[in-house]
Image: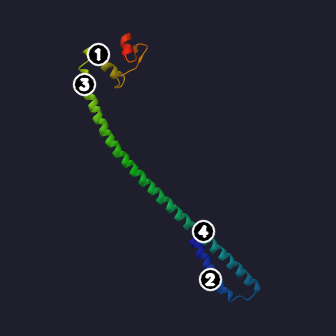
Amino acid sequence: MDIRLAQANERIRKNEERVRSVSGNKELKALNKESSTAGKVIRQAEKEASELRARQTEQGLLREARELEAERIKSDIESLRGELGTKGAQWQAELEGKKAEREVLRADLTDGMYRVYENIRQKRGGTAIVPLKQEACQGCYMHVPTQLYVRL
């Protein structure tokens, strides 16, 4: 675009110099037409340059907006990481408390009951509490006596 602009300006300058040495009306019209064409090229190049500057400004604003959004997202991520760390520590403390509570309750169970409990817990991926349906345990499928079923 700069090259076209420079060429058009050079043509206009040369035409202005040749106007002084013009001898006929036809030659004058041809020079005027060439100058007019070069002027159009210059105006078009200036228009394109203006549009390009506008697009660059727009792209710059969009880039700044995206950078601000990225910074906000990074800040949110850091905040969530801190929150997750805090909650993870709380959950770990609760887990330790529940494990201690389980050991206290284990003392009340017979060895046979504890083995059944551990077997169910291992088969169920750490979950030993299972529902009862129609007087049957859904973990081991043992029949539960009616009075115990009602009590549970």
Q: Earlier in the sequence, mark 3 or mark 4?
A: 4
- Comparing 21 with 52, the one in front is 52
Mark-to-mark CA distance, 4 and 2? 22 Å
Quadrant position of residue 13: bottom right
Comparing marks 1 and 4, which lies closer to the viewer? 1
Q: Earlier in the sequence, mark 3 or mark 2?
A: 2
Q: Mark 3 — residue?
A: 103
Image quarter of the C terminus: top left
Mark-to-mark CA distance, 1 and 2? 106 Å
Q: Mark 2 — residue?
A: 13
Badge 3: how crowded within 10 Å, few (<14), some, or many (20+)?
few
| Kind of residue at disc 4 | Glu
Q: Mark 4 — residue?
A: 48
Quadrant position of residue 80: top left
- The structure residue drawn at horizontal position 24% and vertical position 24%, both measured from the top left corner, is 104
Q: Secondary structure at mark 4?
A: helix
Q: Secondary structure at mark 1?
A: helix
Quadrant position of residue 84: top left
Q: Earlier in the sequence, mark 4 or mark 2?
A: 2
Badge 4: how crowded within 10 Å, few (<14), some, or many (20+)?
few
- Comparing 12 with 118, the one in front is 118
Q: Mark 1 — residue?
A: 113
| Kind of residue at disc 1 | Met
Q: Secondary structure at mark 2?
A: helix
Mark-to-mark CA distance, 3 and 4? 80 Å
Q: Earlier in the sequence, mark 1 or mark 4?
A: 4
- The structure residue drawn at horizontal position 52% and vertical position 65%, both measured from the top left corner, is 57
Q: Secondary structure at mark 3?
A: helix
Image quarter of the N terminus: bottom right
- Comparing 93 with 10, the one in front is 93
